[in-house]
Image: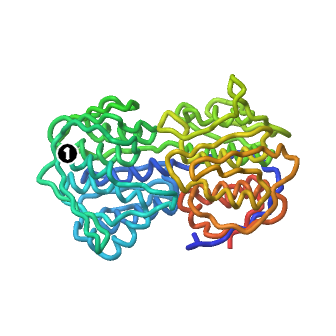
Amino acid sequence: MTTNGTFIVEGGHRLSGEIIPQGAKNEALQILSATLLTAETVVVENLPDIEDVNKLLGLLDGLGAEVERVDRQTVRITAANINLDYVLSPDYVRDAQRIRGSVMLIAPLLNRYGRASLPKPGGDKIGRRRLDTHLLGLQALGANFDFDSERNIYAFETDGLKGTFIHMEEISVTGTANVLMAAVLAEGETTIYNAACEPYLQQLSHMLNSMGAQIEGIGSNLLKVQGVSRLGGCTHRMLPDMIEVGSFIGLAAITQSDITIKDVRLDKLGVIPRTFEKLGIQLEYHGDDIRVVPQDHYEVQSFMDGGVLTIYDAPWPGFTPDLISIALVTAIQARGSVLFHQKMFESRLFFVDKLIDMGAQIILCDPHRATVIGLDRRTPLRGIRMTSPDIRAGVSLLIAALSAEGTSRIDNIYQIDRGYQNIDTRLQALGAQIVRE
């Protein structure tokens, strides 16, 4: 994949065919971090071949874990001999800063070796993403930490983690994952209240239990963990990526395409299909497949009292914040108006200026809210040149470009490659006109 790169997109084509979603990106970062909890071999299947995952595998390799790519979707990891000094090396500091998922390496290293180090992580530029939840949770379990402001590095150490009651101050997915991975090998019982309960956390919990952990309450916001002395190896298969499923629904709707999304694990999608149906999109369910029916028009539902539909993000089982951008773009060609409220990140809606340049009718009310006045296909969007600011906005701009009249250029597609596996070639197979430069 290219370092930054550009997509040249010729819009206005209807797509058709079947597509299989990749393995879940957000789950992958947790699962790969958890492989450090044991010296035995862990096999991970249905792994997405994306930038963020490959970077995390590089960090594991640098730490001394044996990382064997059986194929591009399967990896075998044995973390028997870890070189802790590597966490202070310039290479580790540079690479860990580039991926926010590196924060979840702290708990496994603390548990097995009593110390860990982490540069202040990067990732998407979508607003403040504080580490307090991680730090306070680990501190409650018996970890001490210092922050070197000159080097921008956190240093952690512990004489042994001990179970306790933890009330998470925010429902953080990665924060819950970090605390959970710390608790499974801590001495005694840990209760985690106000825990995130996304399918990714459920998957991590099931994996840890298959390794020998004792976790109760999986799927709820109250987890009880009885610490064990060691964990063993396992084989774990990841869920399909729910964000890709939502992205393909939105893409099919706005381009009037007939697309069937295969093997979606419908039981793990929560309110995602229903939220897109509120935009008037017709979906057919065939076993574990979703067919998006091509429509000349799709009409936004209003609330029962006649009020304007509001779509907002919320912790699971609410609508995931990663799909707000996708749903917003989809609404551009709907009949009716929708208010989108992105509660969790204050910079995630700033990409709408590019959509307005393309001809969309959007009012950015404030950093968290935008109102879309649907065009109802009266006029198509027009192709322009734009830059991908983050993973989800990047794919949203790609979807807009595929529906637009004329040619668009999307720069900085590295941001898209971070989260979407070979998205250009997979959409080309459906008839999309995309060229990577």
Task: Please name the residue that numbered disc 1 is placed on.
Answer: 141
Residue extending farthest to the front is: 365
Residue 204 point in image, percent of width and height: 38, 42
Quarter location, residue 413: bottom right
How is colour applied across the structure in the image?
Answer: rainbow
Q: Residues within 10 Å of mark 1 (few under 14, many from 20)?
A: many
Residue sitting at 33 percent across and 66 percent down?
119
Looking at the rendered image, the quarter that the C terminus falls into is bottom right
**Residue at the top extreme?**
304
Question: Could you tell me which quadrant the N terminus lies in?
Answer: bottom right
Residue type at mark 1: give it. Leu
Relative placement, left or right, of 346 versus 377 is: left
The residue sitting at 46% across, 59% down in the picture is: 53
Position of 277 with respect to 88 (left or right) is: right
As rendered, which of 169 and 398 lies closer to the eye?
169
Q: Quadrant of residue 171?
A: top left
Instruction: Tell me what residue is drawn at x 26 percent, y 72 percent.
Output: 88
| 125, above or below 305, in the image | below
Residue 8 falls in which quadrant of the image? bottom right
Left or right, 22 with reference to 30:
right
- The residue closer to the viewer here, 209 or 108, is 108
Please identify the residue farthest to the right as the structure is shown: 378
Left or right: 415, with 187 as reference point:
right
Q: Position of residue 235 (x, y in %)?
A: 38, 45
Give 370 or 316, whichever is nearer the viewer: 370
Look at the numbered disc 1 and give the secondary structure of its residue: loop
**Whole-percent x, y for residue 84 in the image:** 22, 66
**Residue 294's x, y, as percent?**
80, 40
Q: Look at the picture and state if 334 lies above or below 84.
A: above
